[in-house]
Image (spheres, coloured by chain):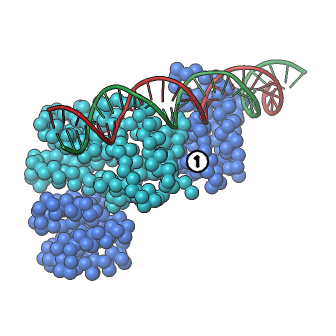
Chain colours: A cyan, B blue, C green, D red
Amino acid sequence: MKFLLVEDNKDLATAIVSRMRLDGHVIDHAAKLDDASAFVATGDYDLILLDIMLPDGDGRTFLRQHRASDFDTPVIVLTARSQVSDRIGSLDLGADDYVTKPFDHAELEARCRAVLRRKSGNSKSIVELGGVVFDPVAGHFSVEGRPVTLRNRELRLLEVFLNTPGQIFSKHKLADRLYSLDDNVSENAIEVYVGRLRKHLKPSRLRITTLRGLGYRLDQHD
Amino acid sequence: MKFLLVEDNKDLATAIVSRMRLDGHVIDHAAKLDDASAFVATGDYDLILLDIMLPDGDGRTFLRQHRASDFDTPVIVLTARSQVSDRIGSLDLGADDYVTKPFDHAELEARCRAVLRRKSGNSKSIVELGGVVFDPVAGHFSVEGRPVTLRNRELRLLEVFLNTPGQIFSKHKLADRLYSLDDNVSENAIEVYVGRLRKHLKPSRLRITTLRGLGYRLDQHD
DNA sequence: GCCAACCTGACACAAACCTGTCAAAAACGA
DNA sequence: TCGTTTTTGACAGGTTTGTGTCAGGTTGGC
């Protein structure tokens, strides 16, 4: 999962970033709205954590523009204000949830999970497909009933594929989702991980098809 | 919009029901879990408002069963408890949101709107024409039900034609769409690809007509 | 009948992809 | 803290295959 944090408070930002990294997520950090817009334009985020009060404007302006341009990336608003009216304002502007500061990190995580689960359509988190059972929350993965331990990156790659099976993902897109902007990996890294994941998926009925020049696709084979 | 309210507190229930009716929604009311299950089985709801503490059991049990049986009706949990752990529990069980009592009615409405807005955001772009089904996202292409694997360039060419069928595309225009400025290909390359695509389209009712000196056009032939 | 425009099978080549190996980095354990 | 184990991604060499050009054939307009 790849997040974008828009927050100007340096200390809070680094705290959230390190916690999210610990959970195995990729997270980029923007300190102001200008940067945030640039990040959103280039990266492909699963979730945006948005502070309302920022040095160069109100986060809600950003939120309105974001929705107006038809992005459906979920947004969780981080707000210090506690007035009900402000909260409603954010929700009506298209926020998917809000958290009032100061907040418990466990709660932020839970809300992230909940929002993400919603977005992926069905609200149950365990995915089952073609002889493969995958529990992204626990990080468990089993093929034909036999549990397999995947490494972090392999797991995340699988997660991307399982979220929308049948879709083509270009290597660039996969890199976007697996890595944050500042680590620039070669496209070969993706090839390597596709190869590794393929080995794990061998006994199952899932396979990753290569579409030359287009990318990769997860399909279910007979 | 049709809602179901599961709530045992009579006063609160009637308050919510009347407010929702005022907003123009249809809302049914169940006072216990047994009734709720019956309502869900028969009616077709857009949203469920679920109290956690009910006379005949915990609302979360209902929620778990609801999700297990693959219903994707969004659920907003109404809870009197404010402990972080309880809230997390509900979200992880598949609730789409929660509201802690006592709550402002405006806030409940805002959350309903937010949840419903999320659900209705799907857009598919599959094109179907003359016995040909084309899914650009999955890269699937089938003629008369039979799947055909197209190569990168063939796919892109087809995409151009299908976007505006019936229109004439000059070879120059097609080259513009398929190639970047700095690779300068001969016009013959286009002819080659039109030929290749024609082979694939043979069993369908689509054909690419040549218009000498003008270009090509995709049309449907009885 | 002639010329230009178009079609097409074959082919060479480069781009795209795969994979084993390895050093560096990160996570882990004591 | 330091040493050990695991994970990670770059690299290089090998393999595959999509691609555009070419050459020769076909078609159509005048």
Q: Is residue B127 visible?
A: yes
Q: Position of residue A138 (x, y in %)?
A: 29, 55
Which is more toward the observer, A153 or A58? Answer: A153
Give residue A213's position: percent from left, percent from top: 52, 35
Q: Chain of mark 1?
A: B
Q: Position of residue B103 (x, y in %)?
A: 12, 63
Residue A197 drawn at (x, y percent): 44, 45
Toward which corner of the image does residue B194 lie, by quadrant? top right
Work out whether residue B20 or residue A153 is closer to the camera in this orientation and state it: A153
Task: Using the image, determine if residue C13 lies above or below residue B31.
Answer: above
The amino acid sitting under disc 1 is: Phe
| In the displayed structure image, the side of residue A172 where residue C17 appears, left or right | right
Q: Is residue A2 above or below residue B94?
A: above
Residue at horizontal 38 percent and vertical 67 percent from the top: B70
The quarter of the picture where residue A63 lies is top left
Residue at horizontal 27 percent and vertical 81 percent from the top: B34
Q: How many marks?
A: 1
Q: Residue at x 35, y 59 (%)?
A: A126
Q: Residues within 10 Å of mark 1 (few under 14, many from 20)?
A: many
- Secondary structure type for disc 1: strand
Q: What is the quadrant of the N terminus of chain B in the image? A: bottom left
Check the image and report above or below for A97 versus D19. Answer: below
**Residue identifier under label 1:** B141
One can see residue B2 in this view: no
Classify residue B209 as left or right of residue B58: right
* Left-right relation of A108 to D10: left
In the image: residue A20, left or right of residue B72: left
| Residue in front for this viewpoint, B218 or C30 | C30
Residue drawn where x is 38% and y is 36% of the image = A175
